[in-house]
Image (tube, rainbow, N blue to C red):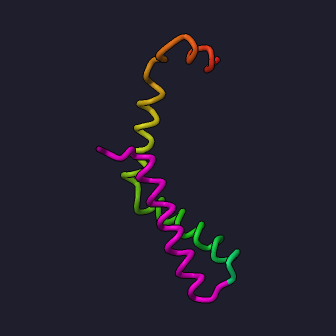
């Protein structure tokens, strides 16, 4: 079974955040500052190094949005 791109990308970003957060906590930095630093660093790292995953997520979103609606209820909900 293949993992959806958005699930993989989300898990990578959350995992990267968690690793950085725990490392900073172990270094003795204040928890709220650890969270801010981990968020900024994980955002930058995911932007720089995980472009293929990000592109796969974008293509998956485009593929989902381009499919026609399955039934009348779905069309009515979109209006």
Compared with residue 60, is residue 19 higher up or lower down, i.e. above or below? below
Horizontal side of 19 relative to 1 (left or right) equals: right
View extreme (left): residue: 1
Horizontal side of 34 relative to 60 (left or right) equals: right
Asked if the magenta segment contains residue 69, the reply would be: no
Q: Residue at the spot x=57%, y=82% of the render? A: 24
Residue 56 screen position, x and y as percent: 38, 44
View extreme (front): residue: 1
Question: Is most of the magenta stretch helix, strand or loop?
Answer: helix
Compared with residue 71, is residue 22 higher up or lower down, i.e. above or below? below
Residue 45 screen position, x and y as percent: 47, 66
Horizontal side of 55 relative to 76 (left or right) equals: left
Q: Which residues are magenta?
A: 1-29
Q: Residue at the spot x=60%, y=82% of the render? A: 25
Res 1 quadrant in image: top left
Residue 66 screen position, x and y as percent: 44, 24
Asked if the magenta segment contains residue 5, the reply would be: yes
Residue 53 screen position, x and y as percent: 39, 51
Q: Quadrant of the C terminus?
A: top right
Q: Which of the two residues, 7 or 57, is positioned nearer the viewer here? A: 7
View extreme (bottom): residue: 28
**Badge count:** 0
Q: Residue at the spot x=65%, y=70% of the render? A: 36
Q: Which of the two residues, 75 or 58, is positioned nearer the viewer here? A: 75
Compared with residue 60, is residue 65 higher up or lower down, i.e. above or below? above
């Amino acid at each position: 079974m293949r993992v959806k791109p958005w699930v993989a990308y989300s898990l990578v970003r959350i995992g990267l955040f968690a690793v950085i957060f725990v490392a900073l906590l172990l270094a003795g930095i204040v928890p709220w500052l650890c969270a801010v630093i981990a968020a900024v660093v994980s955002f930058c790292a995911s932007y720089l190094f995980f472009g293929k995953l990000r592109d796969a997520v974008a293509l998956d979103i485009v593929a989902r949005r381009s499919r026609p609606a399955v039934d009348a209820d779905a069309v009515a909900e979109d209006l």
